[in-house]
Amino acid sequence: MADNEKTETTEEAIGLHNLKPAPGSRRPRKRVGRGEGSGTGKTAGRGQKGYGSRSGSKRRARFEGGQNPLHMRMRKLRGPNKKMSMPFEPFRTHTQPVNLADLEKKFDDGAAVDLDSLRAAGLGTRKNIPVKILGRGELTKKLTVHAHAFSKTARERIEAAGGTCQVIEP
């Protein structure tokens, strides 16, 4: 065997020239309208008459077979003072709640609770949404809490435990 001859390996190199789909994963296109013996001749699988048998017919995305479509079945409430009239509620202010029970569980006595420490503790994790402290639960630890808003009961309970509430301006 000469040195300049290449030895054949048992494995062929994989490249774009020899890639094939998995066997059985591809089926040939159904050729309709090619004679009655083919099984899809004459009406070519479109049925007898009606809109779907005509040339140029399309299935509209929202069409429900003539049934009253969903967008017409929805109720029609108008005006900004109806609760469900505007589903995205563009004028509602959004806050993310943090309860006193969570602060009691996650922080030690005398700790300073700000937005970074809340996020590190897994509370108030959504960015650019104000944090509001709510009064659910009891607080026995003296905490200095920095948040965008406080409920009345939360402020009373934090101050009753010896802590302070400081409002952050957004």
Image (cartoon, rainbow, N blue to C red):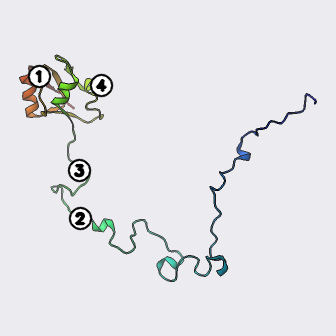
User: Label 2 sits on what residue type?
Assistant: Arg
Q: Reading the chain from its start, which is encountered first: label 4 or label 3?
A: 3
Which residue is depicted at the point 32% across and 72% down?
Answer: 68
Q: Residues within 10 Å of mark 3 (few under 14, many from 20)?
A: few
Q: Which mark is residue 89?
A: 3
Image mark for residue 140: 1
Is the C-beta separation of discs 2 and 3 under 8 Å?
no
Identify which amino acid the numbered label 1 is placed on. Answer: Thr
Q: Are marks 3 and 1 in contact (CB under 8 Å)?
A: no
Which numbered disc flags the more N-terminal residue, 2 or 3?
2
Quadrant, the C terminus: top left
If you read the primary sequence from the N terminus, does the residue marked by circle 2 or circle 4 appear first?
2
Outermost top residue: 110
**Which residue corresponds to mark 2?**
75
Question: Which residue occupies 91% across, 28% down?
Answer: 3
Residue 21 relative to residue 77: left or right: right
